[in-house]
Image (tube, coloured by chain):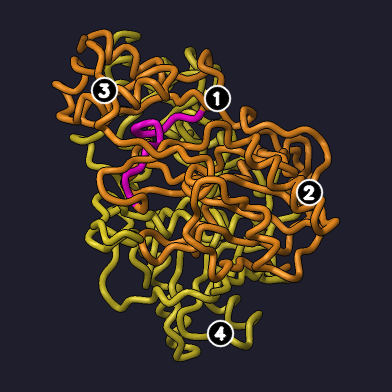
Chain colours: A yellow, B orange
Amino acid sequence: MDLNLHAIENVPIIKPGDDIADIICDLLSDIQDDDIFVIASTIISKAENNFFKLDGITAGPEAIRISKLNGKDPRFVQVVLDESLEVFIESPFMLVRTTRGNVCVNAGIDGSNVGDSVYITLPKNPEKAAKEIGLKIFEKTGKKVSIIVSDTNGRAFKVGQTNAAIGVYGISPIRDWVGSQDLFGKVLEASKQAIVDEIACAANISMGEGSYGYPIIRVRGLSLYTDEKVSINDLFRPEKDDIIIEGLRLLRGIED
Amino acid sequence: MDLNLHAIENVPIIKPGDDIADIICDLLSDIQDDDIFVIASTIISKAENNFFKLDGITAGPEAIRISKLNGKDPRFVQVVLDESLEVFIESPFMLVRTTRGNVCVNAGIDGSNVGDSVYITLPKNPEKAAKEIGLKIFEKTGKKVSIIVSDTNGRAFKVGQTNAAIGVYGISPIRDWVGSQDLFGKVLEASKQAIVDEIACAANISMGEGSYGYPIIRVRGLSLYTDEKVSINDLFRPEKDDIIIEGLRLLRGIED
């Protein structure tokens, strides 16, 4: 069983209003059923015109308070707060749950690959964006493809970043092995593979960073397309089960 | 730029004393420089004969105390403690730092694919195992290959498991983009890609679980081989910088 990851060449620098599905269809002549496209969230954000400059932002009292702890510009902190449902860590970096449901540093706001003094927020609704791109590719080619919108994240306990899915279309986020049997016939009890995060990681190997970037990767060799409704929310741990968040809340309560 | 992941067919069920490098060389006739082999830790544990049964274990007072909280067999808890440097969460599952340095649930002890009432611990020294396999393949083929020993882990904030590297040879765990320039010439400040974890995730897409398992994946298309000394420890966040561990310790202190 072979899996192929192909970094799409000649993707232009994306501008507000650009149509990612059109770009994919223009650059690839051989799109097939079950192809999976992993798309770096940055280019969707650019197409959505999610750029901002600090000049236009007024920081409120909470942003000013946090900025004194972490040394960031209070206007930057204000935008992180605007993009977040809850702040778990305030300093030395801000770890938040974004309004999209994912947990990440600085609400995923990025200052690279967007020009001087300019920042960009995550896609407004990564899952909606994924669906629109998948449906448009189907409309143009008749091929049923899956879409994963990805963002680079830090991790607990480990240094370095890996890619993660923040929006999906046409692929279930979890591959559930529970109930299948092992080599000795024993039923597996706890195997839920976060397959879309693993595919996002695989794509990131070829994506690179900075000026070497390939923002769209085609993954071929899997048969994971589904017509069923899928939701990235299936990947987010319910807070009532989340002991790490419990610990971080406790830490915040004590530090405040 | 294309990346190929090839699941090696016909890997036998590994028995104590088996030589993984011999098996790889026997099954593949075209090993090339820069090939990366991702090897599921379970098969290394089997070759090392790391099996145990609960029958032979005597639980101490700490194991008995924790077993009353999490409902596990106290003898199982005893083995988890024996394999761990620190316990961060005791219940409903045990999150520990293993004696190898990685943080995971139940010290990575697995009860699947090893037969009835039998468990298996992680490889004694995954990095040493990786090095031995890489050197033996070089000795037999003259090809400079990289080795990643992987294990499946849960994650903070998210449900589902992904693969992660727990030992490496011939590949640096981090791909450091700091200092390189973005599309607009701005210097990147914080991009350390945990490339070996991403390659482990990529491999896991094809590994599968249970009776469908392919425990060895060949990754081809990258030029990441290095003769320099590498260490998986570069991936483990220093505890003094780890706010999540601080929160979990606080939570334990209050619960105790």
Quickly name the residue at label 3.
Answer: B90
The range drawn in magenta is B102-112
Are tags 3 and 1 found on a single chain? yes
Q: Are marks 2 and 4 on the same chain?
A: no
Amino acid, disc 3: Glu
* Chain of the residue that carries numbered disc 4 in the rendered image: A
Kindly report which numbered mark, 2 or 4, lies closer to the viewer in this rendering: 2
The dot on residue A31 is 4
The kind of residue tagged 4 is Ile
Check whether the beta carbons of the residues at disc 2 and disc 3 lie within 8 A of each other. Answer: no
Q: Are marks 3 and 4 in contact (CB under 8 Å)?
A: no
Q: Is residue B24 above or below residue A89?
A: below
Chain under label 2?
B
Magenta stretch holds residue B127: no
For the N terminus of chain B, the quadrant is bottom right
**What chain is tagged by disc 3?**
B
